Image (spheres, helix red, strand yellow):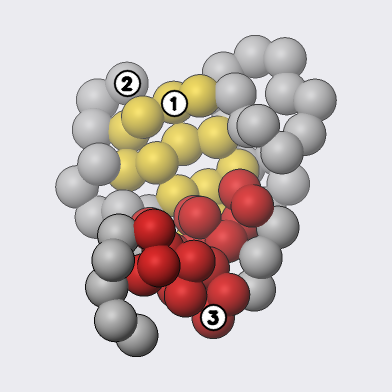
Amino acid sequence: MGRDWVALNPTRADRSPGSFRINMDNCLWADFATDDRGGDAISLFAYLNGLQQGQAARALAQRFGVQP
């Protein structure tokens, strides 16, 4: 929808797209139904996987072969 990727929130029983959005220009993401939000890919990965920010950064670094 415009520059926002709109989807069902996979972390809860979301029934209709619209409240969970990721802006493709600035990487801001939010679930307007729960007020969860973040500003980068690491925070989104952390949210979707139930991790702390540092844990998410290390997991992504390992997944992509980047030395922390």
Amino acid on which disc 3 is placed = Gly
Disc 3: CA contacts within 10 A as few (<14), some (14-19) or many (>=20): few
The quadrant of the image that shows the N terminus is top left
Q: Secondary structure at mark 3?
A: helix
Which residue bears the numbered disc 2?
A: 1
14 versus 61 height, above or below? above
In primary-sequence order, the first of circles 3 and 2 is 2
Residue furthest to the left? 25
Identify the residue shown where x is 24% and y is 25%.
Answer: 2
Amino acid on which disc 2 is placed = Met
Q: Is residue 3 left or right of residue 9?
A: left
- Contact between marks 3 and 1 (CB within 8 A): the answer is no
Disc 1: CA contacts within 10 A as few (<14), some (14-19) or many (>=20): some
- The Cα–Cα distance between marks 3 and 2, rounded to whole angstroms, is 31 Å
Q: Is residue 23 left or right of residue 57?
A: left
Q: Is residue 52 visible?
A: yes
Identify the residue shown where x is 64% and y is 52%.
Answer: 49
Which residue bears the numbered disc 3?
A: 54
Q: Nearer the viewer, residue 24 or 10?
A: 10
Residue 13 position within the rendered picture, expressed as x and y whole percent measured from the top left: 80, 25
- Contact between marks 2 and 1 (CB within 8 A): the answer is yes
Which residue bears the numbered disc 1?
A: 6
Disc 2: CA contacts within 10 A as few (<14), some (14-19) or many (>=20): few
The quadrant of the image that shows the C terminus is bottom left
57 versus 29 height, above or below? below
